[in-house]
Amino acid sequence: MAEHSTQGAMNFRPLARLKRTRAVVRAALIVERLWPLVLPLLVLLSLFLSLAWFGVFRILPDWARIGLVALFALVVLASLWPVRTFRLPSAAEIDRRIERANRLEHAPLGAQTDRLARQEDDPFAAALWREHQRRMAERLNRLTGDLPRTTIPERDPLGLRALAALLFITALAFSTGPYGGRVTDAFRPPAMAQTTPARIDAWVTPPPYTARAPIFLTADVNRDTQAFTVPQGSAVMVQVSGGSGEETLAFLEDGGGQQTIEPDQAPTGNTSDSTGAVRFSHLLEADGTISLKSGGTTHDWRFVIIPDRPPEIRLTEEPKRAVNGTLELAYEIEDDYGAVSAEAQFTLAEENADARPLYGPPELPLSVPRGRNKAAKTSQDLTKHPWAGLPVELVLSATDAADQTGKSEARTFVLPERPFTNPLAKALIEQRRLLALDAEQQRRVLALLDAVMLWPEETFEQASHFLLLSALRSRLALARTDDALRGVVDEMWEVALLIEDGDLTAAERRLRQAQEALRNALEDGASEEEIARLMDELRAAMQEFLREFAERAMQNQDFAEGQNGQMMSQNDLERMLDQIEDLARSGARDQAQELLSQLENMMNNLQAMRRQPGQSGQQSEMRQQMDRLGEIMRRQQELMNETFRLDQQQRGQQGQQGQGQQGQGQQGQQGQGQGMSPEELAEALRGLQQGQGELRGELESLMQGLEGMGIRPGEGFGEAGEAMGEAEGALGEGQGERAVGEQGRALEALRRGAQDMMNQMQQAMQGDQGEGMSGARQNTFGRDPLGRPRATTGPDFGDSVEVPDEIDSQRARQILEAIRRRLGDALSPQLEREYLERLLDMR
């Protein structure tokens, strides 16, 4: 009995292991039979999901999307048809798979379930069968399962099914991004027919040189506008989005004509861009109406054209010669939007038709006024040109951005020339002009040079002059072409300068070149680095010129005495150059050009004094009166500043008690008003009344002194005295704000009176001195040798450049930085960016 139990326990363990093995093999057979049947379905589903996640269904049109989904549905149904053949494995099939996997012979698993056909008839056979089953069961102790073995590798030897898996994983990752699609994109309902009207955008872009902003015709504020006034040459753009593509645009002229406007061609050759929008463009040259027909509706925009007139240019003064020989032209240019270039055109008044000239007319580009200014001045040294000293006919020409040209009336005058006092230099210049005007005069010029060199001991003061003329004569004799003759003409000029002035003209020439280069850079809108480089060159050239100028003054005692101690300091020139550079960097290039022109005039006056030594000083009595006026204006300015400071403190204490400490701290740095009570501030204002009354008395004394000199005080002085009286009364009443206004009016009136007094003094001095040399500037009373108002004459009387103060410069920099920041914004509309770029070009 015990032996039977032990044997039963031993049989239980193989049977449990057999049960587990059969379950594993059963699952393997199911996978092996089912996987080939469902794999096509899984591949199709993965492809469908991949296309959806890649956004293919979102971008396809409705007919293509629906057709692709239907195709997938049919293929999925077809892939489900083989699944009907699936059968679960039987127990015998499982046992046979286990026997094959474990290489069992004689079917030991089958022996465990098989029975003898006649077991009860033959006990011996039954016992023998049980022994056989026991022995077969002993072989089942180490049974193992089997893995599925599908036929997929034989059906897909290239492994294309892996591509579907790779595409599925990639699409899954892409779907998490902003451009990924969704499965629902494949099943969205078809788009309904277009029921909303097409979007119409229309705008007008004026020409860039007008600096006008674009006009959006379809904006809400412009819907009721009957007619749009735009400059000639404006471009109208009409864009239709979401339309049928059959839109038409026409331009109806007011005179009755009609012009059909064709759509713009896209880069692909179509009439619509990638978004399906149709765009039209047309340049407006005459009054008319733009008519758009879209979807059975008509949209009209009427335009009134502002014609672009050609520029007008005219001389405001006769062409004149500056003190250093340069040609000065004062002119006005008027144009709708400003001229872009101007030049002076010269022709000889008496031209020899048979001559063979070596040089054409001189080239003189003119500076163009910026902004609202019409008046401009240009000075250039043309004394080196062979036409210098000859009668010429001058015509000024100006061109605007639309390539329209306007010309002035012709003026005939003698082109300024450099005066030569040395007889040898003068004779050489005459022959130079003769050769330059007619190359056929080469033999005659050679004969004259031979005659001059015939007696060198009596003709030449220095041996170097003889050597220079000898080399010049040899080059002229060997010259066979016009280029060679032009080289001789240029060398004749250099030799004449060396004979006349020595080496000082080299410094003058360098200074003029530096000034001209800086002026051209300001006109062309050069970069800050280029401006800084040219300013350094101008400073170096001016240092060299002033050094040689001082050396000449030390050598010429009469010239040194003629200065009379009025020499302008080098620090003044440096401050003026710094102002020019600061104005150019801050964008105020018009003021920088005006200040540079004033610097050129000052240098011209200084050069004129070098060539005209010995001139006496101005009348001392007139100078004293000018000094007195300058002192009055200076004191009035200081008094106005003090009044303004006290008034600001008074109003700050009354209106902003909470912020009084900060305001008082700032005002305390400016004067002695820190910590004053309201009563003390009012008393301080009344204390300024005495000073204002003294200034008024000094002004009356000055007016009496001018009458004694025969100069009639102008209306400005009378108005200044009246304003001073009003300011005096306001100070007595403690009304600081009214006092400041009257003091400012007094200062402005004093400037006008000073300018009138200066003009009367100059006229009186002209009567005493006479005309002098032709074209030279006379009567520099009240100015230093450089032509600038002396420091003792007080503030500027209105004839100098108005230099922006620190607040104006700071405001200009802030505006430029704001424009640049807006341009740096990548999201700014293109039209706005173009408009801001035009604003920067107008600097």
Image: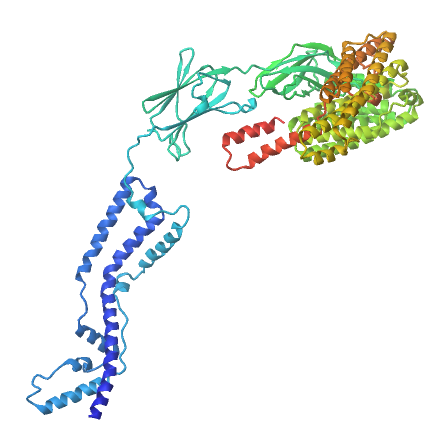
Q: Residue at x 35, y 54 (%)?
A: 167
**Which quadrant of the view contains residue 118?**
bottom left
**Which quadrant of the view contains residue 273?**
top left
| Quarter that holds the C terminus | top right
**Colour treatment of the image:** rainbow
| Position above or below: 167 against 419 | below
Q: Is residue 428 visible?
A: no
Residue 266 appears left or right of 582: left
Foreground residue, 5 or 599?
5
Residue 649 appears left or right of 89: right
- Counting from the top left corner in percent of width and height, residue 161 is at 31, 58
Label count reads: 0
Q: Is residue 196 visible?
A: yes
Residue 504 appears left or right of 32: right
**Which quadrant of the view contains residue 678?**
top right
Q: From this viewpoint, which residue is outermost toward the front?
A: 679
Q: Residue at x 34, y 57 (%)?
A: 165
Residue 556 appears left or right of 491: right
- Counting from the top left corner in percent of width and height, residue 1 is at 19, 92
Q: From this viewpoint, which residue is outermost toward the left?
A: 121
- Counting from the top left corner in percent of width and height, residue 566 is at 87, 23
| Position above or below: 736 against 126 | above
Foreground residue, 212 or 605?
212
- Counting from the top left corner in percent of width and height, residue 174 is at 39, 50
Foreground residue, 39 or 662?
662
